[in-house]
Amino acid sequence: MKNIVLIGFMGSGKSTVGCRLAHRLGYKFVDTDYEIEQVTGLTVAQIFAKHGVKRFRGEEALLVSKLMHQQDLVIATGGGLVLRPENVAMLQQNGVLIGLKASARTICSRVRNKRTRPLLARGNLRENVERLLRERQAAYDVAEFSVDVDQLTPEEIVDIIYHYLKEKGYVR
Ligand code: S3P
């Protein structure tokens, strides 16, 4: 069966929802940030600090090229992974892209104390989030189905995605 690929901004709940969805489907869960940390032996923040964003995006692309040959995965992607169209194309080959959409307000409340996200570590959080959301809107629009997560619990989001996947025949 196709992989289920969760895309969306930092703090939209991809990892939490992805882990629960994988459990529900009996699929393996893959979190791209976590995989990259395992492969490189560095945290995401360390990769950004030591080697820069380009290197991190390179690691993401390498990982995607491996994941595209696997199936029955739920993949929680890092928020910037879909910025490279070639990543999107590879993921679409054997995967269905599902978007999680959160407002700037929700995102800020969730990432406020998390300095683990280098792109939000400096400057005004709200301004940075709003700017990146604007810049990335088109990138997240590649999802074939999106859920507005602001008013929903993780369980409710999983339910909505699960029923969509069933209805479309993407899962057994
Ligand atoms: C990033 C999102 C992060 C992580 C890195 C860059 C981004 O992942 O990959 O800090 O560019 O949006 P999460 O979306 O899991 O926070």
Image (cartoon, grey):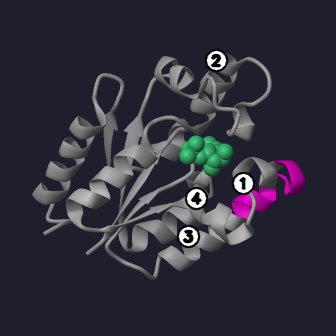
Magenta stretch, main secondary structure class:
helix
Q: Amino acid at mark 1?
A: Thr
Q: Secondary structure at mark 4?
A: helix
Residue tagged by mark 2?
126
User: What range of the chain is rendered magenta?
Assistant: 49-58
Query: Foreground mark, 3 or 4?
Result: 4
Query: 10 Å neighbourhood of mark 1: few (<14), some, or many (≥20)?
Result: some
- What whole-number distance in Å separates the C-alpha atoms at marks 2 and 1? 24 Å
In front of the other: 120 or 128: 120
Which quarter shows the C terminus? bottom left
Residue 43 circle label: 1
Label 1–label 4 contact, CB within 8 A = no
Q: Position of residue 78 (x, y in %)?
A: 57, 51
Q: Amino acid at mark 2?
A: Arg
Query: Foreground mark, 4 or 2?
Result: 4
Classify residue 65 as left or right of residue 124: left
Residue tagged by mark 4?
34
Of the two numbered discs 3 and 4 on the same chain, state the one appearing first in sequence. Answer: 4
Residue 64 circle label: 3
Of the two numbered discs 3 and 2 on the same chain, state the one appearing first in sequence. Answer: 3
In front of the other: 76 or 165: 76
- What whole-number distance in Å separates the C-alpha atoms at marks 4 and 2? 26 Å
Q: Amino acid at mark 3?
A: Val
Classify residue 113 as left or right of residue 27: right
Q: Position of residue 109 (x, y in %)?
A: 52, 20
